[in-house]
Amino acid sequence: MTKDQNLPENENGVLLHLEDVWKIYQMGEVEVPALKGVTVEIKKSDFVAIIGASGSGKSTMMNLIGCLDIPSKGRILLKNQDISQLSESDLATFRGKTIGFIFQQYNLIPTMTAFENVMLPLEFQEIDDKIASKRAKEILAFLGLADKIHHRPSQLSGGQQQRVSIARCLVTDPEIILADEPTGALDSVTGKNIIEMLHRFWREEGKTIIMVTHDQNLAKYANTTIELKDGEIIRIQENEVNEI
Amino acid sequence: MKLNKCLKHALNMVLHSPLRSWLTIIGIVIGVGSVIAIVSIGEGMEQSLTEQLDDLGMDLITITPGFSRGGDMRFGPDREGGQAAEGQATDDETVLGRTDVQALRGLSDIELIDTQIRGNVDAAYLGKSGSVSLTGVEQKVWSQITTSEIRDGRMLDSADQNVIVIGGGLADNFFDRPLGINKVITIEDSAFRIVGILDDQSNSIIMPLQMAYQILDDKEKDVYDSIIVKIKYEDDLDAVVEKIENKLMITRHVTENDKDFTVTSSKQTNEMRGEMMSSVSAFLTAIAAVSLLVGSVGISNTMFTSVLEKTKEIGIMKAIGARNRDILTIFLFHAGLIGLAGGIIGVIFGIILSGVMPSLMGGLPMARGGTIVSVDIIIIALSVSVLVGIIAGFVPAYQGSKLRPVDALRYE
């Protein structure tokens, strides 16, 4: 797999830098701040768990980190690139190549097969069909879905769907994996499988993983825990990572 | 995303479209179908006109009494007796007679002159009778001038008396039994023997002029309903028309302003009919185009719904790297494909419709030429329907492409 973006990182290995980031939603006449001046640095090859109760702003933070939204105030530097300076189309391309998403509800396209879903990000990057198809099949096989590639999401179990979505995330070889409650919709055994899989990508492939969760038990897999409350960071904690 | 991939995803969307999308297609189907059907009739008319033009011969000029500016369809406001006298010699002053024929004989460009009278008569055969049109002709000349072909028997001859040539329709279908050569039918109580049957579908009877004067007793001798001349050189047609007009104006002591006769060439007649028919078919096409317009509104509506339905998918696609223009292209292809599907089904529908149309329209002269569905019109119809789809789908597709990924992802 090739690294498509080779922008220099900070000398100290900071991949993502949030600088006094505010996100304010306009609810009719009222302004509701969802994030209030968050400043945080995430280094390359970190496994960060963002935890907090619902309404604490973790989803908002996730959207900002994933370049799905832009801050109301403050700067987000991803690989030294201020994301609010990028045009829509550059941002989309940058996002597609740098970040892989894993969602709680898998977010697969229901009318496409597993294989087509995994191919999709490569098609947006206009990668040659032969290469793309080979890579997609390899990854699906790696995730134990070799016999399911022509199944549609509706024909797959929750765990299988989440593995397809992980395959879709990994197929572009992103530097950052953003996982939003990746086990939220799964039973505990399947959920554990998924989180262990993520853990392996972190340990063995050196991926940077940012995971949003409300589950304290999942947070212990991460080497850094960021706790949010009412739109502010109340605690950043380095963990001893349990060997699995 | 490459265009072929966009097309693939758009096709995937259309194939997974709910029933509603297919209902939308019906709007386009009806629009395209009716345009095809109407245009096919138009082309059929045009072709039959062209054939008639060939049949009629480009070297015939018809002179009728009275003046109606038939050539260009403009009727002079001050032309008394203009329209009224069309084709029928009456007791009015505006008649064509011997002197006119004499005048025409003086023109060197004219090869043959036929004088005709017309009327409706009762014809009877084996107890069955009915009204048919009768034309009295200068038999020797007519045989050389007419563009009709003989199917059976022979043309009229100069020595003929009490014999007739009849149209194919009259021979085959008019009476209880088909008529053949040498059968005798009764026309206004006089018996006539059939010597020839024309190769057409008309119900007309052609007989020697002198006999016709006897049968049509309201006609005055040596007064003609029309004079038909054949010119020597086809290329001179327009010039000869003018010469005839000038000559007759002099002999009839009239000027351009109170002209009391009409000179038409077969070319003019056909041009006029062609114009009429193309304006009729343009009008009908415009009506059909309205249904295409309604169909496009339907596409627009469906595309708005489709974009709304796919909002979450748009969000997902954007999250994994889709640019606005990728989304725009996919949805434009989607709309175009709906248009194309409607177009294809519409073309099939139109071809079927144009096949049954002539029988639906019965004996209307418009449909006599049958219908022709040309490749051109199919290609045009398909391109128009795709274009209509894309135009109708543009606004919804644009809106969809502009969705912010975070909002689109949150949409349930």
Image: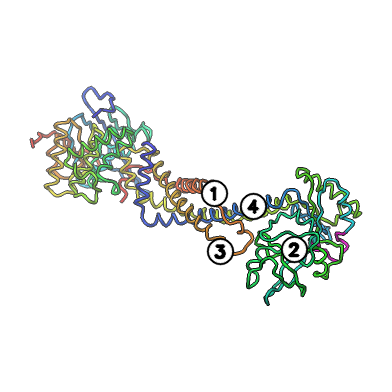
Location of mark 4 (residue)? B278
From where the camera sits, is residue A45 visible?
yes
Q: Position of residue A237 (x, y in %)?
A: 14, 35
Is label 3 in contact with label 4 (beta carbons under 8 Å)?
no
Q: Which chain carries label 2?
A: B
In the picture, measured across the screen, residue B160 lies left or right of residue A145, that is: right
User: Marks 1 and 3, Cα distance to the nearest angstrom?
Assistant: 21 Å
User: Marks 3 and 4, Cα distance to the nearest angstrom?
Assistant: 21 Å
Q: Which amino acid does label 3 sit on?
A: Leu
Q: Mark 4 lies on which chain?
A: B
Secondary structure under the numbered disc 4 in the rendered image: helix
Q: Residue placed farthest to the top in the image?
A: A11
Task: Label the magenta part by its dominant secondary structure.
Answer: loop
Labels 1 and 2 within one chain = yes
Is label 2 in contact with label 4 (beta carbons under 8 Å)?
no
Secondary structure under the numbered disc 3 in the rendered image: helix
Q: Quadrant of residue B326?
A: top left
If the image is split into quadrants, where does the N terminus of chain B sit? top left
The magenta region covers: B83-97
Secondary structure under the numbered disc 1 in the rendered image: loop
Location of mark 1 (residue)? B374
Is label 3 in contact with label 2 (beta carbons under 8 Å)?
no
Q: Earlier in the sequence, mark 1 or mark 4?
A: 4
Q: What residue type is labelled 1?
A: Ser
Q: Mark 1 lies on which chain?
A: B
Determine whether B47 is above or below A46 in the image.
below
In the picture, measured across the screen, residue A15 lies left or right of residue B265, that is: left
Q: What residue type is labelled 4?
A: Ser
